[in-house]
Image (cartoon, rainbow, N blue to C red):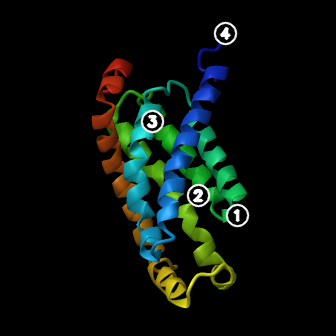
Amino acid sequence: MNDNKLKAKDFITVGIFTALLFVVEFACGMLGFIHPYIVASYVVMIPLVGSIPMMLFYTKIEKFGMITIMSVLLAIIMFVTGMGWLGAPLIIAAGVIADLIAKKSNYKSMKAIALSHGVFCLWVCANYFPVIVTSESYRKSLIDGGYSMEYCDNLFRAINSKTIIFLLILCFVFGVIGAYVGKSVVKKHFEKAGIV
């Protein structure tokens, strides 16, 4: 029997934690209705708040593929919830690379997990791809949906082709910081999992 092969319980674990991460994303997303600058701050909020369920998830990972599968599920969820496929390549690439980084230490090194989480959190920026790539049609859909011109102007001022690199960097940095925040919350689980 191949112990590295993912089993039913691994898929269930991935499903549960993907759902938890989506709840965090959805809750932060609802705040975006208040002000467009809050939308831009997803790169800080989601990596920090989402780090708690994510660090608990990392303590459950022993085999390659679980983070990758989570990223595929997130890409599907983003599509189903109306964000399209534009961000899917980033989401899945971030998941695969994050998986590979954590795997190098057999998912037992906190430094590797922090770096892995930083890379994984880049998926958050997939939220911005429709704003940047399909800006005109996206602006029209917002206005048709009842948003004010001022809201749209501020949104496109905060999120555009010039700011996306800065947003990606912020996402990575707060993903790394979030890993240590999450670890402090679920410290006992880290000790039990033997992560140092």
| Position of residue 58 in the picture relative to residue 9 (left or right) | left
- Give the mark nearest the N terminus, 3 or 2: 2
Which residue carries the number 3 mark? 102
Residue 169 numbered mark, or none: none
Q: CB of mark 2 within 8 Å of CB of mark 1?
A: no
Total numbered labels: 4
How far separated are the C-alphas under marks 4 and 2?
Answer: 34 Å
The location of residue 99, given as percent across then percent down, is 52, 39
| Residue pictured at 51% horizontal, 83% vertical | 151
Q: Quadrant of the N terminus?
A: top right
Identify the amino acid type marked 1: Gly
Image quarter for residue 181? Answer: top left
User: In this view of the protein, which residue sits in the foreground, 102 or 185?
Assistant: 185
Residue 152 image point, x, y percent: 54, 84
The relative height of residue 46 versus residue 100 in the rendered view (above or below) is below
> Disc 4 residue type?
Met
In the rendered image, the vertical position of residue 16 relative to residue 46, given as above or below: above
* Numbered disc 1: secondary structure: loop
The answer to whether residue 7 of the structure is visible from this angle is no
- Give the number of the disc on residue 90: 2
Locate the C terminus and report the quarter of the image it occupies.
top left
SS class of the residue under badge 2? Answer: helix
